[in-house]
Amino acid sequence: MMKPEPSELKPGAEQPPGPRIRHLWIFWVFLAIALTFLVLEHRAHLFGALPFLLLLACPLMHLFMHHGHGGHAGHASSRPGEISHKE
């Protein structure tokens, strides 16, 4: 089976994914190589910032982990020993 020539494709038809996938692979390989060199060359800077990144993670985890339980508004209205069931 022959591939259609670009002139034979309809204007609204989707083009074959070959070149697009190849470009994505090239991009990801280039990005992996670039990140490897970045980490290897700037290792001292990254390790120096690690304690500060851990301290920054604490308030960020607090903000994002309290997202699902509805906040602190419902705590005062329940009686001691009572289990509240929210739907």
Image (cartoon, grey):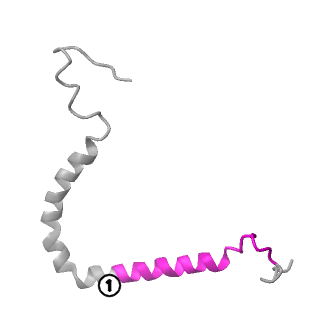
Q: Is residue 14 magenta?
A: yes
What SS does tag 1 mark?
Answer: helix
51 over 25 or under it: above or below: above
Q: Residue at x 54, y 76 (%)?
A: 24
Look at the image and tell me in which quarter the N terminus lies: bottom right
Residue at image mark 1: 37
Q: Is residue 33 magenta?
A: yes
Look at the image and tell me in which quarter the C terminus lies: top left
Closer to the camera in the image, 67 or 39:
67
Residue 30 is situated, as x and y percent measured from the top left of the image, at 44, 83
60 over 40 or under it: above or below: above
Residue 3 is situated, as x and y percent measured from the top left of the image, at 81, 80
Q: Magenta stretch mostly in which secondary structure?
A: helix
Q: Residue at x 47, y 76 (%)?
A: 28
Residue 56 is situated, as x and y percent measured from the top left of the image, at 17, 58
Q: Residue at x 40, y 82 (%)?
A: 33
Query: Which image quadrant for residue 55?
Result: bottom left
Total marks shown come to: 1
> How many C-alpha atoms fall within 10 Å of the one at disc 1: few (<14), some, or many (≥20)?
few
Which residue occupies the extreme right position in the image? 1
Q: Residue at x 28, y 79 (%)?
A: 39
Query: Which image quadrant for residue 45?
Result: bottom left
46 over 73 or under it: above or below: below
Q: Which residues are magenta?
A: 9-35
19 over 65 or under it: above or below: below
Query: Which image quadrant for residue 5?
Result: bottom right
In the image, taking residue 22 as reference, residue 56 lies left or right, namely left
Residue 50 is situated, as x and y percent measured from the top left of the image, at 16, 67
Amino acid at the residue labelled 1: Phe
